[in-house]
Structures are given as structure tokens and as C-alpha cells.
Amino acid sequence: MFGWLVWRDLMLAWRRRADVLATLFFFIIVVSLFPLGIGPERETLRTIAPGVVWVAALLASMLSLGRIFGNDYQDGTLEQLLLTPQPAYLVVLAKVLAHWIVSEVPLVVIAPVLGLQFGLSQNGLAIVVVSLLLGTPVLSVIGSVGAALTLGLRAANVLVALLVLPLYIPVLIFGSGAVQATVTNSDPQAWLLLLAATLIVSLVFAPWATSAALRISVE
Amino acid sequence: MLDVINLTCVRGTRRLFSNLNFSATEGELIELRGPNGSGKTSLLRILSGLAMPAAGEVRWRDRNIQSLREEYYGSVAYLAHQNAVKDELTALENLHISSAVAGKRLAKGRAQEILDRVGLSQQQNLPARVLSAGQRRRLGMTRLLTSNAKLWILDEVLTSLDDRAMNLSREFIADHLKQDGIAIVATHQDLNLNAPRLQQLRLT
């Protein structure tokens, strides 16, 4: 059942790939605007690179949060999913996994290319990828709580930003900290471990909160 | 099997119904009647486990459905106003995937058979987006045939269906009752079913 739900979401995303590409292009454009606006000075760019990449990733993933449950809520599929004989926790986990694959993995793949614009070292680019790989699932799973809470509300998009962005702060600090460490030639390992810890804690608790929020939203 | 005890439902500040009591046994049909806004859908949502009652409880095989949860969901098929049909998928994919997600994979020929039965075999490879309202409703109805659920909760099943499809849904319900199933149907039209055990429930 879990696998089928992930497969279903991937298939739906493929049939609506314009939505997915929009998020990716948003990420590319936001990251590319900084070198254009700040100028080509190598040292400055290298210093701001970690923050810019991570803030852009945060904003891009926030843009796609409405899609996790929005369509299913509108056509009544969400109710049916909550009435399947499996724990709602697993339903949420499957949908979050699909969202991560569809909306976050492309960001992780394209990020090193964008990092080149900022003159990051090879080591720096590798850490960008690793930190995003650890951090973006946290964005998906914490974002799912906000998405579930704001389902069916009129100003859902704005509310989601207000709810979720503050919760993203630890990920932002740990993620950009890891990349920053490579710029200043120190060891990023501690930052990455913190990110991994955040990932584990959020994977355990957030889906539980999301399923509770979903039950409130469909009622 | 299904016992509703002192059920009260409040929406906002309005009390839709209070102290509702009834029970249903195998092979029983419950027709739920009442004007618009009398709480038919709210009652059905409480019975399906999606909504919580303000007071009272629903029991299935002598246990509260809120504590049974997933165990209960396995024996319920709930057909709401919305068809839970995915626009991007074809009729055939909708059928296959929705039953697989619910944990009941269909054998290869079975899906075709079901679509044939609801009269959608011509449209099986069309995306659901291009189907008419009635056709989407029929596609939604297929869930009843795939679910093997003991308890059917149907909200206005007959809306936007033509005569043929209406007869078909009557046939489905009659078959279900024959196999000792329970059906709770909210409706404005007469079902005209010769159910061996029939209960009419009126909300005001």
C-alpha cells in the first residue's frame, strides 16, 4: 500500500510536470539573481553562497507545499486515503516521500551547478549536496504539518509561510553552517551530524502531527 | 453489528440532531431522509469515522469505532459527494491505483470486468478529466465493487446518474444486502428496493 501510494503520487506529478518544473526554475532564478545583483567579486560571492543556496532551497520547497495534500483534498481522495486500513502515519510518510522525490531531489541535483557561479570549491560543492540531501527531507516533513493545518483555508499560501518558515530555521542554520565550514576550511562534520539528528527527530514526530492535523482538516 | 448510541452532532452553534439511536444488522438497509441541511452528510461522516460526534458513540461489533480505527476502516466503503477520482489518470488507472492504495490489488481482467459492469469500458483509456459528471460518478461507484466492505455508507448515490446507472446502483445495493452486507443510504429519491430488512430514518 505504501509503495503504491508513492507510485501514484509520482505518476500524478509526472502528468503535471509543469508544476514541478516551476519550483525548480524558481530555485535556479533566485540563486542566479545574487551574483548578478552583487557583482562578480569572488570573495564576497563565496561568503554568501551557503546562505543564498539554502534560503533559496527553503523558499522553493515552501512554494511546493500546497501540492502535498491540496489536490487530494479537493477531489475527495484524501478522505479515502484516511479511510484505508493502514495507519494515517504511513499515508503521510508516503506522501512526504513522494513530495521529497518530486520537489526536493531536483533541487539537490541542480545545486552544485549553481554553486559553481559562486566559486565554491569542489569540496564545498560536495558538502552542498550532502547537506541538502540531509536537510531537504526535513523541509518536506515539517512542511507537511503546515500544509495539513492550512488545508482548505483561503489564505493558505501565506499562512503556510508564516507557520513553516520559523520551523525551518534550525535546518537553515545547520545546512548553511556546513557549507560555510568548507569555505573557512574547517570541518563540516558536526553540522552534518546535527542535520542528520534533526532529520531523524522530525521523521519520527512530524508525520504524527501531520496526520492529526489532517483529521482535523477533513472533519 | 452497527450500533449508534445517543449520537449528537453540532455544527458551529447549530445542533443538527441529538440523542440519535439506531442499530443495523446483517442484510439491513437504512434509508436516511431529510431536507437539505438536516445533517445527513454529517451523520454519514461520523458513521464513516471521518468526523467526531459532539456526544454519543458509534459501535461496530460492540466496540467504539474511534478505538477500532484502521480495523473498522477495512470494513467500510464510504461514497461521498466527491468521487475521489483523479483527473490526471485514466479510468482504468484510477480503478487499479485506488484499490491498490486501499490494499486490494485487482487481478488483470477484473478491472476491465468492473468497468464493463458500470458501462465505462469504452472510456477506460480516457483521462478522467474528460469524463462527464455521471461517468465520473460511475467510476466512483466502482469502489463499492472492489472494497469487499461489509458496511456501505452512501451519500446521495443517485445524483447525476441516468436511469440505467440508477438501476445499476440499485442492483449493487440489492446484491450487497443479499450477501449479508449493511447499507446506509442518504437519498432524496425513492430507492424502490425490496430489501428484506428496511429501516427509514428521518432527520428534521
Image (cartoon, rainbow, N blue to C red):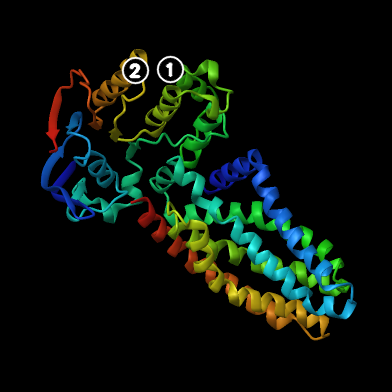
- Give the residue at mark 2: B168
Mark 2 residue crowding within 10 angstroms, few (<14) / some (14–19) / many (20+): some
Secondary structure under tag 2 reads helix
Q: Which disc is residue B117 wearing?
A: 1
Q: How many badges with numbers are in the image?
A: 2
The type of residue carrying mark 2 is Leu
What's the CA distance linking mark 2 and mark 1? Answer: 9 Å
SS class, disc 1 = helix
Looking at the rendering, which quadrant does residue A113 occupy? bottom right
Q: Is A163 in front, or is B137? A: A163
Q: Position of residue B114 (x, y in %)?
A: 45, 22
Q: For label 1, count other residues whose C-alpha is less than 10 Å away and answer few (under 14), some (14-19) or many (20+).
A: some
Chain identifier of the residue bearing label 2 in the image: B
In the rendered image of this protein, does residue B67 appear above or below residue A182? above
Q: At 51% across and 17% down in the image, what residue appears?
A: B121
**Image side of residue A70 versus residue B73, left or right:** right
Q: Position of residue A106 (x, y in %)?
A: 72, 55
